[in-house]
Amino acid sequence: MDFEIFLQSEAWIALLTLSLLEVVLGIDNIIFISLLTNKLPEERRKTARTAGIGLALILRVIMLLGITWIIGFTQPIFEIFGFVATGRDLVLLVGGLFLIGKSTSEIHHKIDGGGKEEDAKSMKKQAQKSFVSIIIQIGLLDIVFSFDSILTAIGMTEELLIMILAVVISLIVMLIFAGRIAAFIERYPTLQILALAFLILIGFVLIADGLHQHISKGYIYFAVAFSLATEVVNINMRKKSKPSTNIDT
């Protein structure tokens, strides 16, 4: 690897730009990790988040080191009714279906599932099993999310060192804020449903992309940001209205 490239201002600009893009592309990943790890006992959540993000880092670096292999995934595999499928398309389709199915299942669990006491007992009883299962699920989705990340990196620069550093920086940022995001989501049940709805939307975007119907994530992030801002206003309004309901008579 040639470290002399950092003597050029263009390399630093590329690193900063790509790092920011990687952070943005990692939003859906960190929400998924937060929702899954929040199901674990509190003392195990940080370990699970660290393991999940660490796994994402390892997978993305391995994929970057195998750029030729990744590019090969964009080559046609078969054609059916005029649709030319590539390895990337199949990964996105399977990943999108998994994300929709998992998020829908979580919504049903939160709405129709047992009470908090039952959930707590279940978590304590199957803590180790749940931990391994959650890490496996995070790993599967990391592979899907990594395709967007790696293909974006390839499109931004040809320098492998810049790509790797950008991925490392973005995942460090994710690791720093993962706990806060998870705690924020856990505190408000309505935000949990909103986050799951966002993941369902991302699942549809992945499927559409796998079917060669590209949808700009900018529109998705704007819609989610608007919904989140609306919910934050609702939360603040509910907080302000609480004291008025406790007026002494």
Image (tube, rainbow, N blue to C red):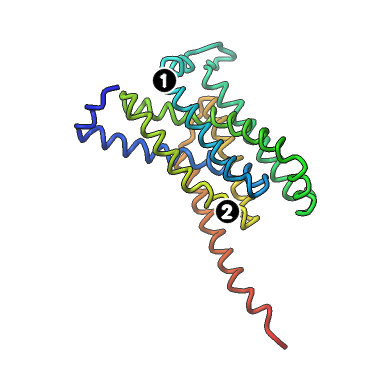
Nearer the observer, 246 or 122: 122
What is the x, y in percent for residue 11? 25, 32
Q: Is residue 174 above or below residue 249?
A: above
Classify residue 34 as left or right of residue 148. Answer: right
Res 144 → quadrant: top right
Res 156 → quadrant: top left
Question: Is the residue marked by circle 2 packed among few (<14), some (14-19), or many (20+) residues within 10 Å?
Answer: few
Q: Which residue is mark 2?
A: 183
Residue located at (59% from left, 13% from top):
80
Measure the C-alpha gap from mark 1 to mark 2. 34 Å
Quarter of the image that includes the C terminus: bottom right
Under circle 1, the secondary element is helix
Question: Is the residue marked by circle 1 packed among few (<14), some (14-19), or many (20+) residues within 10 Å?
Answer: some
Q: Which residue is mark 1?
A: 65
Under circle 2, the secondary element is helix
Classify residue 175 as left or right of residue 96. Answer: left
Residue located at (60% from left, 70% from top):
239
Classify residue 134 as left or right of residue 144. Answer: right
Q: Is residue 91 above or below residue 226?
A: above
| Amino acid on which the number 2 mark rests in the picture | Ala
Q: Is residue 165 above or below residue 86?
A: below
Q: Earlier in the sequence, mark 1 or mark 2?
A: 1
- Label annotation for residue 12: none
